[in-house]
Image (cartoon, rainbow, N blue to C red):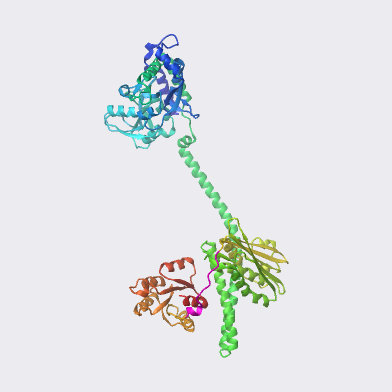
């Protein structure tokens, strides 16, 4: 409100004093409305159908371009009257925002330039002619409230880079002022507002317009004595005659303008000024509203955010309660299943251990018990692997090992693994495969994992005498990708529609199948689905209660070349077996590893921690040890530090000895850390003897 009162107070004062600031050529006024023109001036008007006028675009409300890109403001109203009186037709072209030089104006062939300051500097300037002023006002200083203006003090002044004449005037009259260039008038105001500059000196009409913006409520206008802002036309004269514009022609144009300006009365100028100011008052924007009521807006936004957060918390709490109940139920079923799945094989192992102790001399029985023990151990290992896989997939830490694979070999491998089990249950087992691209890029282990899970489920849930079919085919996409499609169909009992909706969820098991002795962990299908999607494919199921199920597993891959046949056989690789140094802190595990190595024909030594492993290696003759089996978690010095210490030894074989990490931790982070410490390979506990021996033979 105070801002509006200040504006209208200043405007009324301006209106009453306007006669002191308008064009002073009243004595040239002629009662008739026609100009007294010379023949040369008439010829100029006749020959110039359109006069190209450079128009200042950013001094609202004096001179600017409106939303339609048209010249507007107080100056435009006066120019229309000048055009009417003189007969000249003006073509307005916006001047650039930056520094308007003489060369620029001359190069763009402007006939006239507007809003040029009427002062001694421009009167004497070489290359331009100026008219009498068509609009006179005063300049004011804009500074922060509380600022005391002093002509002799050192102040920094924000100036538009195009205001060359103003710079010259200020430099002459106020040599202590430091002038700072800014691109636009609002940037000058911003500089004062934030303290980058002390003040702005600008036309009073322009100042009143911008001070209406709430953002500048901390600024005030201070009149400056002796700094008038008289605006006039300027004609650019080419003293080198490069453009064909003669000094005489420019002078003729200025003479015509002076006669027209002299015809415009004080009342007309006042009316044009009032019209220009009233038509172009500052329009409030949303940003102004937000700034003016910023504290209320901030309070509202904070309150809204708090309410929104509370709503989100309540909704999430409600969902969490619902989810936790369902998850608790699923986890309860999972723990119950896990307890059964672990206790049952452990009970078998303990029973077999007792039987073996009673039948030590019965080789036939001992062989049978050992086979059964091996089967149970492998089952327990697969159970642990399922849990680890599920965890890694949930946390998105599973990484595929992509390399060329043979799909025919994979199909035959999983079929042969399941074939005996199918025949023992007297199932009709049929395998059909048709691969257009038998060699593709993929993760062999993970593909086998999915297929074995599906085949095992089909066998498990199909009654004796039923049928299981395992088929495979391929399709090619437009992008030349290979889509491999595996199907496993059975004539088992099928699944209910309710269970099919949640069958791929973690821990999910259908109660009826559990009660019939087909209990599992409920992790298999969930893992298979995530693996399929990790390979760019999917896992779907069609099932009907009492009629069986069909699972479709797809994955997407690139075609691969047929791998070259291995020239070296395993026997050739065995011909020189290196001595092995075993670092293992568990005494029983160490003895077992030593016995396995000796059985396979390896010579081996064992130490119980990493520190002793480093000493044993450094004390041995160069080339004694070809392989080090390094446990990772050991007392005194772990396997990581021991590996780095061995690699740092100053001996030739320190860089070439193969170090194989041997640990119960199978996560990718552990593997990466081992490789970074200088290890060459990685095996997980419980150790698969065949895998370990293969790595030792080919190391």
Give the quarter of the figure containing the C terminus: bottom left
Where residue 223 appears, as percent x and y from the top left, is 34, 25
Give 176 or 604, whichever is nearer the viewer: 604
Where residue 692 appears, as percent x and y from the top left, is 49, 76
Query: How many marks overall?
Result: 0
Picture layout, residue 429 above or below residue 314: below
Where residue 169 appears, as percent x and y from the top left, is 30, 27
Q: Which residues are magenta?
A: 560-574
The quarter holding residue 385 reads bottom right
Q: Is residue 211 visible?
A: no
Give 371 or 107, whichever is nearer the viewer: 107
Q: Residue at x 46, y 65 (%)?
A: 669
Q: What type of secondary structure mainly makes up the magenta span?
A: loop
Q: Is residue 69 magenta?
A: no
Give the quarter of the figure containing the N terminus: top left
Where residue 231 appears, as percent x and y from the top left, is 38, 22
Q: Is residue 417 visible?
A: yes
């Amino acid at each position: 409100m105070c801002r509006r009162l200040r504006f209208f107070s200043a405007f009324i004062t301006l209106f009453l004093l306007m006669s002191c600031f308008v064009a002073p050529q009243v004595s040239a006024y002629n009662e008739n409305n026609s100009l007294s023109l010379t023949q040369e001036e008439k010829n100029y008007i006749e020959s110039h159908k359109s006069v190209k006028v450079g128009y200042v675009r950013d001094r609202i409300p004096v001179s600017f371009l409106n939303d339609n890109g048209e010249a507007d403001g107080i100056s435009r109203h006066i120019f229309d009257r000048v055009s009417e009186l003189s007969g000249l037709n003006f073509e307005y072209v916006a001047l650039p925002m930056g520094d308007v030089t003489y060369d620029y104006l001359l190069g763009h062939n402007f006939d006239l330039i507007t809003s040029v300051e009427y002062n001694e500097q421009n009167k004497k300037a070489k290359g331009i002619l100026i008219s009498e002023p068509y609009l006179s006002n005063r300049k004011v200083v804009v500074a922060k409230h509380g600022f005391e203006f002093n002509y002799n003090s050192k102040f920094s002044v924000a100036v538009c880079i195009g205001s060359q004449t103003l710079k010259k005037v200020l430099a002459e009259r106020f040599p202590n002022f430091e002038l700072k260039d800014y691109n636009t008038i609002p940037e000058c105001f911003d500089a004062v507002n934030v303290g980058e500059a002390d003040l702005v000196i600008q036309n009073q009409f322009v100042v009143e317009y911008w001070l209406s913006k709430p953002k500048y409520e901390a600024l005030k206008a201070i009149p400056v004595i002796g700094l008038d802002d008289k605006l006039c036309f300027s004609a650019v004269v080419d003293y080198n005659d490069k453009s064909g514009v003669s000094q005489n022609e420019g002078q003729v144009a200025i003479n015509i303008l002076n006669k027209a300006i002299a015809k415009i009365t004080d009342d007309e100028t006042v009316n044009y000024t009032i019209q220009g100011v009233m038509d172009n008052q500052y329009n409030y924007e949303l940003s102004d509203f937000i700034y003016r009521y910023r504290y209320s807006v901030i309070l509202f936004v904070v309150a809204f955010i708090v309410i929104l957060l509370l709503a989100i918390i309540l909704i999430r709490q409600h969902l969490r309660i619902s989810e936790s109940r369902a998850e608790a139920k699923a986890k309860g079923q999972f723990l119950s299943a896990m307890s059964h799945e672990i206790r049952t094989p452990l009970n078998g192992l303990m029973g077999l251990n007792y039987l073996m102790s009673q039948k030590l001399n019965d080789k036939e029985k001992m062989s049978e018990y050992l086979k059964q023990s091996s089967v149970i151990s492998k089952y327990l290992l697969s159970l642990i692997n399922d849990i680890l896989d599920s965890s890694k997939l949930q946390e998105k830490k599973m990484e595929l090992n992509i390399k060329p694979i043979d799909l025919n070999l994979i199909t035959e491998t999983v079929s042969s693994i399941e074939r005996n089990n199918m025949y023992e249950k007297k199932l009709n087992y049929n395998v059909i495969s048709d691969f257009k691209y038998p060699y593709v890029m993929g993760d062999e282990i993970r593909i086998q994992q999915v297929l074995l899970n599906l085949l095992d489920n089909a066998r498990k849930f199909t009654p004796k005498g039923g049928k299981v079919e395992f088929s495979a085919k391929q399709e090619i996409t437009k992008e030349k990708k290979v889509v491999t499609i595996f199907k496993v169909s059975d004539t088992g009992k099928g699944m209910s529609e309710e269970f099919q909706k949640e069958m791929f969820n973690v821990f999910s098991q259908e109660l009826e199948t559990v009660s019939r002795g087909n209990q599992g962990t409920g992790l298999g299908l969930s893992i298979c689905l995530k693996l399929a999607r990790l390979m760019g494919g999917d896992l779907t199921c069609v099932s009907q209660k009492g009629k069986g199920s069909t699972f479709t597993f797809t994955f997407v891959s690139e075609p691969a070349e047929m791998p070259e046949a291995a020239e070296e056989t395993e026997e050739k690789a065995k011909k020189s077996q290196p001595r092995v140094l075993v670092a293992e802190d568990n005494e029983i595990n160490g003895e077992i590893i030593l016995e396995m190595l000796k059985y396979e024909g390896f010579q081996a030594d064992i130490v119980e921690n990493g520190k002793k492993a480093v000493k044993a290696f450094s004390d041995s003759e160069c080339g004694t040890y070809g392989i080090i089996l390094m446990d990772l978690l050991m007392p005194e010095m772990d396997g990581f530090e021991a590996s780095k210490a061995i690699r740092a030894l100053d001996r030739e074989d320190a860089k070439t000895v193969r170090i194989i990490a041997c640990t119960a931790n199978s996560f990718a982070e552990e593997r990466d850390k081992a490789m970074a410490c200088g290890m060459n390979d990685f095996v997980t506990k419980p150790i698969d003897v065949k895998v370990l021996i293969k790595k030792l033979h080919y190391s």
